[in-house]
Amino acid sequence: MPEPDRLRSLPSVASLLEAQEIRRILRKTPRAVVVDAVRRVLSAFRREAAAGAPSRSREEWTALLVSRLPAEVAAAEEPSLRRVINATGVVIHTNLGRAPLPEEGIRAVSLAARGYSNLEFDLASGGRSSRLVHVERLILGLTGAESAHVVNNNAAAVLLCLAGLARGREVLVSRGELVEIGGSFRIPDIMAESGASLVEVGTTNRTRLRDYENAATARTALLLKVHRSNFSVSGFTEEVSTAELSSLGARLGIPVMEDLGSGAIFDFSAAGIPGTPTVRQALSHGPGIVTVSGDKLLGGPQAGIIAGRKELVDPLKKHPLSRALRIDKLCLAALAATLALYADERRAAASVPVLAMMTEGEGAVRARARKLVRRVRKAGGAGLLLSIERADSSPGGGAMPEVRIPTACVAVSHPGMRVEDLEETLRRGDPPVVARIAKGKLLLDMRTVRDGEVADLAAALLAALSAG
Ligand SMILES: *Cc1c(COP(=O)(O)O)cnc(C)c1O
């Protein structure tokens, strides 16, 4: 039968909405949601008919639609943004939302969200104030900077600095640092948007102080150093340290800026994880201004922090772009609460999730892996083959590209199920679990799975098997 004939008996949306079963759904679901769901199922029928599905009577089509509709409606009512269990071992996973907030940050967000606040209101004088006051003092105390500004994210911080300090003039950057950070943040593009002109110095693998010196002219507004973040250069390489660049800048009277990317407040090297200086250490090498992300190694909300010398940072606070790039009150609340935890490094290491995950010992991660295995086995195991394997977690977020943190993974396989299917079923489950496949096994890295998620993860594994 040709396709149009096969579809002749397909019921109309209007007639379907009169069907008994659908009227029942309409009693508890908004009409628009049901109509959309009906339309989606009907389009699926048309596609199936085009692909050669058998012809059906009107009653058969209706029955089939009624059987599919509840799942379609449920899917439509599910919020798009959902909690996910991160079993990838990538601590700062940009696609999974980067840093989970500390409890203190979550409480601050909820307080600021629920009602009014003194966001830009000085309670002492009754006059207008700046939202910056809630974080600037904390940043100065933690970094030793003279002045600090906070915007929407670090990309915005870099854009604002370049626009405010170098619009219409030149900025020198090493060719080896013209980086692209995930999500289309490219230094040359940001530079173009800021109105500053990029002057590349040195080569991809080697840049010397002389290269900057030779390129500096009366039009040079800034010497910029960019943290490479998501890659490293090895072999025949040479780069100019921030300290050297800063002395050159001082000699030539040109400010030096460093985009640290994920710069930390916590001293990871003291915890045995080398690779990222603290913002305080970075500033001690002499740049006039540095920029960092709030939701990378700092472990707070999305934000961009600009810290440095007063004469460079203060004018940026009044720059017209500052208004367009300003941090919202919920992120500001979370940032203030997160920064406050750093007054005591030990407390920060325990209560800022990114720090806790980064610094947790392999033994503790292994204990969590054993807990998961015990739980699944206790529930019958469903034929799953489970073992605990050593592997490496990574900081992610372009924070420390070379750093690997020894971790414990639960390796999962099932004789009756392809590992790719297991991975997909877990990813599409509730809550979704994101894991990786290595050497034919599914690896659940327990470093990024928190204690409170072990029960859910066990349940998700068992459910995946009954689904698969
Ligand atoms: C991550 C990163 C950025 C972008 O920061 P966002 O907070 O994601 O906007 C910029 N520069 C460097 C070096 C980075 O690592």
Image: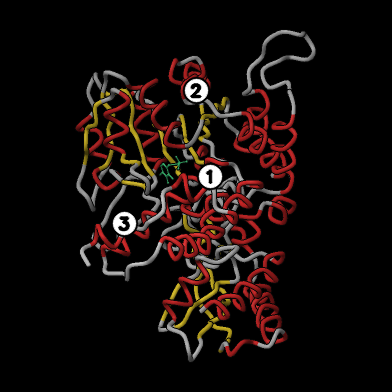
Residue under pointer 3: 8
Tell me where residue 230 appears, x and y as whole percent: 38, 54
| In this view, 41 is above or below 289 | below
Kind of element beneath mark 3: loop
- Residue type, mark 2 in image: Val
Determine whether label 3 and label 1 are within 8 Å by CB. Answer: no
Mark toward the viewer: 3 or 2: 3
- How many neighbours does mark 2 have within 10 angstroms: few (below 14), some (14-19), or many (20 or more)? many
Question: What number is the disc on residue 429?
Answer: none
* Identity, as a three-letter code, of the amino acid under mark 1: Val
In the rendered image, which quarter is residue 409 located in?
bottom right
Q: Which mark is residue 313?
A: 2
- Which residue appears at 70% of the width and 50% of the height? 348
Residue at left 53%, top 82%? 411
Name the N-terminal-most of marks 2 and 1.
1
Who's the residue at 24% across and 57% down the image?
4
Q: At 64% from the left edge and 70% from the top edge, which residue is drawn?
A: 361
Please, is residue 64 above or below residue 153 in the view?
below
Q: Mark 3 and mark 1: span between their CA atoms?
A: 25 Å
Relative to 219, 433 lies left or right: right
